[in-house]
Amino acid sequence: MTALLMTGAMLGWTVPEAAPGEPPWVVADASPEAFSHPLPGRADEPFLRGRNLFRRAWLDGSRSAGDGRGLGPLYNRLSCVACHPANGRGRAPDGPDARVQSLLVRLSVPGTGPHGGQRPHPVYGDQFNEEGVIGVPGEGRVQIRWQAVAHRLVDGRIEWLRRPALSFTELGYGPLAADGRRVQLSARVGPAVYGLGLLADVPEAALQALAATPRPDGVRGVLNRVWNPVTGRMEAGRFGWKANTADLTAQVVQAAAGDLGLTSRTLPEAGCGPAQPACRTAAATGDSPELDDAAARDLVAYMSGLAVPAPRGDGEPRIERGRMLFAAARCTACHQPTLPQPAGRPPVMPYTDLLLHDLGAGLADGRPDYRASGRQWRTAPLWGLGLVPVVNEHGDYLHDGRARGLREAVLWHDGEARAARLRFERLSDAEQGALLAFVASR
């Protein structure tokens, strides 16, 4: 595919345009910058300010806000880009001695929390924060050990997969066991952030129609309903591994609070529990809000303005063969090729329905999230997936990074996806390779 190039004077880099015949929401770039280009007309000042904020390393917030201050008192990483490198996917650590640089752990206890969501842990809240500013102990360290899992293929052969086992050390505020209740844990890698504005623009009516439509193999998606702290009402969830966030503004302020410890007008309280007095003392010395409305809008402008890399290999025999096999295996029952946009705009091709599906016990984290059960996950978009090794220098997939390549990701599919996975396993090696090549080309 030949890229038409234009110089973005304000951006300071060369921005590929869509090639002739390609939709306007893609850019023809397969380089390490593939996830970092703006949509046409979106390289404006709010986008650029948001890009700077996304890359900013925040400073200790206990000494006053402004000039990039506001971090903590408890936090996970110093910047947005630390968990979403180059706007792409984070990864899990290789073993217990490696730090969880772009992975976090959600936690809760059984029961219903505020607005029908999960119930936060009484001490550690709903997200484990490893780090603390000076004078505030972090909550501890997360360790991941990989357990081998034998997967028996339809022909009887064994293929070895892996899954993470979590443990915690250096706990700063007592044991995780909460009043005798089981603690629900879920490891999550930072997801890619390109194309989010296009997904935000999919009409809710289209998602409701998809949820109401029976599909092959008994597949039927569930539209999550979640509390939006920005609007103060229950809305359709479409972002996050369990579709637990309603819109991009909510995503920004919730991630700022949970990952960086930044207060906002929407979430003005620091995430300090009753057993964390040093955290509360440090929070009281800083200014609030630390992420003001203008900064939140700029971050939304950046995240909603990122384009999607153009598909690669269309028309090539192997890719076209893989496209047919992908449809014949009925992978499209969940990975819907197209989703509509508002009137007057062409549809987008993310290969997702943004709905929740039961993917079986093997992928279950046992942690409900509003309407999402412990076995349900939002259908992950496939666009740009094959460029993760180029942009992020790894090939790990699924919500916790357990799959070491696209083939392992497919083999973990069960529940509603079991019939499609079995069809994949019955394909010849060459056919499986073509199907995976198609997925990687999107």
Image: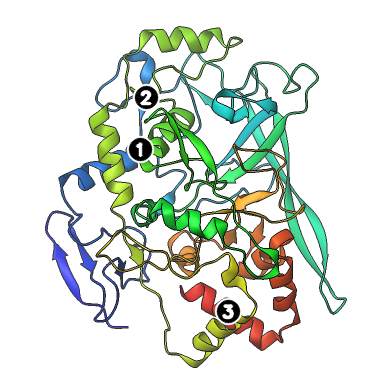
C-alpha distance separating marks 3 and 1: 35 Å
Measuring from the top left, give residue 81's x and y in whole percent.
Answer: 40, 45
Query: Residue flagged by tag 1: what amino acid is it?
Result: Thr
Image vertical order of residue 248 relative to residue 200, above or below: above
Marks 1,2: beta carbons within 8 A: yes
Q: Nearer the viewer, residue 255 or 369?
A: 369
Q: Is residue 129 visible?
A: no
Residue 194 placement (x, y as % from top left): 38, 56
For image coordinates 72% across by 41% down, the residue present is: 366
Q: Which mark is residue 249?
A: 1
Circle number at residue 362: none
Mark 2 crowdedness (10 Å alpha carbons): few <14, some 14-19, many ≥20:
some
> Of discs 3 and 1, which sits in the foreground?
3
Q: Total of numbered circles in the picture?
A: 3
Looking at the picture, which amino acid does disc 3 mark? Ala
Q: Quadrant of residue 167?
A: top right
Does the image show residue 51? Answer: yes
* Dot 1 or dot 2, earlier in sequence: 1
- Quadrant of the rendered image containing residue 21: bottom left
| Outermost residue to the bottom | 317
According to the picture, the residue beneath numbered tag 3 turns out to be 327
Residue to which mark 2 is pinned: 266
User: Which element carries disc 3, helix, strand or loop?
Assistant: helix
The residue positioned 65% from the left and 86% from the top of the image is 431
Please give left or right for residue 133 compared with residue 3 in the image: right
- Looking at the image, the residue that sits furthest to the right is 156
In the drawing, does residue 238 fall left or right of residue 122?
A: left
Farthest residue in the left direction?
9
Residue at disc 2, secondary structure: loop
Between 252 and 392, the one nearer to me in the picture:
252
